[in-house]
């Protein structure tokens, strides 16, 4: 099957939306927690969280400021400067998915979706208690992508909470042991099975792929 | 286990690199194919490919222009304006991983790693024959992220090749059926198992999570 630019544009709108949201491959499932200045907690699922650098530890995610569902997250981060990123696990994918519904601004997705807001060590944004790996983030910069009116929201990692047993030798995280979830498109959820781990690739240690 | 900003900075350099490369959750495994103006094909694995928008179909990936391994990809795209994005499957994760080795510029990662360059319909960058889902991309813009000397390379989707059976009703892709691979950190590879697919979330159709 081959789709060129014209046949992509000619797809039904929903088909195009689902296809283009899927063609990059598996995406991480994360819940972003935030708090408004007037005291409302917000929680929303994002599949666009991306590693940008390790020193300093920088993480980004893409948001459409005009997106009604996720505007609360964006506005809270701009107002308070803090947010949390919480891994979604296979045990609560449905709760996580439904945080994407357009609730009223004063309704908390935590309550509506059966997840628990957790406040830790004075950090000004709520974590998700059910998540075993959570990050406390400080906002650094929003980089506008004017091509389609989205923005890359960049923050630094201030806190990492994780179970001891998920932190393996050398700093590797075992995402299967964490029960982590992958997303395809806007609504398909995948579990992960670790297949292999390879050493840092050096040309003189190359396996013989051409035998 | 709790790491604050100071304990993250105090980690051994390799531990910090691996941990921060892992904390965003699962990442997609993609091979980016490009071609230099003087006729050398290049192939490199990237875990930072991200969906940015569906109409127009925009896809980005993060690259450190000073990264010796992936500089060829960056320079080829800047010079020619075209590249391919090819899904990695579970059947060739080791070949894909070793494209990250620092080969000489005139050496082709295709040959070295036992993968096959495929030229289709006059497109000026090589696809990976072994990949069942591949995208022909046209470069649009590089957005510098001066916080850490990286750039977000943005392109539009010109071609999509995929097996008929992976394109499900409504435009959803089945990544398990494709045999797609996820990455954690820099060197751990995961297979995917589809758990569930939920409808578009509407507040009045919310399951009862609080019973």
Image (tube, coloured by chain):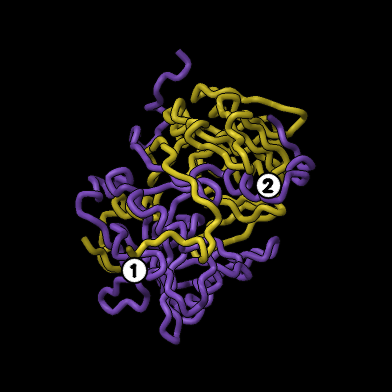
Chain colours: A purple, B yellow
Q: Secondary structure at mark 1?
A: strand
Q: What is the crowding at mark 2: few (fewer than 14 residues within 10 Å), some, or many (at least 20)?
A: many
Extreme bottom residue here?
Answer: A38
Q: Residue at x 58, y 32 (%)?
A: B166
Count of marks, rendered view = 2
Task: Locate the N terminus of chain B and report the quarter of the image it occupies.
Answer: bottom left
Left or right of B83? Residue B112 is: left
Pointer 1 local density, CA inside 10 Å: few below 14, some 14–19, many at least 20? many
The image position of residue B40, as x and y in percent, is 64, 30
Numbered badge on residue B154: none
The residue that disc 1 covers is A127
- Same chain under badges 2 and 1? The reply is yes
Choose between A64 and A197: the one closer to the eye. A64
Give residue A33's position: percent from left, percent from top: 41, 69
Tag in front: 2 or 1: 2
Horizontal arrangement in the rendering, residue A130 relative to residue B117 (left or right): left
| Subunit that carries the residue with mark 2 | A
The C terminus of chain B sits in image quarter: bottom left
Q: Secondary structure at mark 2?
A: helix
Disc 2 marks which residue?
A16
Q: Residue, x 45% and y 85% (percent of image)? A: A37
């Amino acid at each position: 099957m081959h789709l060129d630019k014209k046949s992509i544009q000619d797809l039904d709108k929903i088909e195009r939306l689902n296809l283009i949201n899927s063609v990059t491959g598996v995406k991480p499932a994360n819940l972003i927690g935030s708090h408004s200045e007037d005291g409302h907690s917000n929680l929303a699922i994002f599949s666009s969280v991306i590693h940008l650098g390790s020193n300093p530890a920088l993480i980004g995610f893409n948001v459409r400021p005009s997106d009604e569902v996720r505007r609360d997250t964006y506005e809270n981060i701009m107002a308070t400067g803090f947010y949390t990123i919480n891994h979604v696990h296979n045990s609560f994918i449905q709760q996580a998915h439904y945080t994407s519904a357009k609730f009223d601004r004063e309704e908390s997705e935590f309550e509506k979706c059966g997840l628990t807001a957790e406040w830790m060590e004075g950090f000004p944004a709520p974590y998700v208690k059910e998540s075993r790996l959570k990050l406390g983030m400080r906002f650094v910069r929003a980089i506008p992508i004017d091509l389609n009116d989205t923005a890359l929201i960049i923050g630094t990692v201030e806190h990492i909470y994780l179970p001891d047993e998920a932190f393996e030798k050398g700093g590797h995280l075992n995402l299967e042991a964490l029960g982590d979830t992958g997303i395809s498109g806007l609504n398909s959820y995948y579990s992960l099975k670790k297949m292999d781990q390879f050493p840092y690739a050096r040309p003189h240690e190359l396996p013989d792929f051409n035998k």
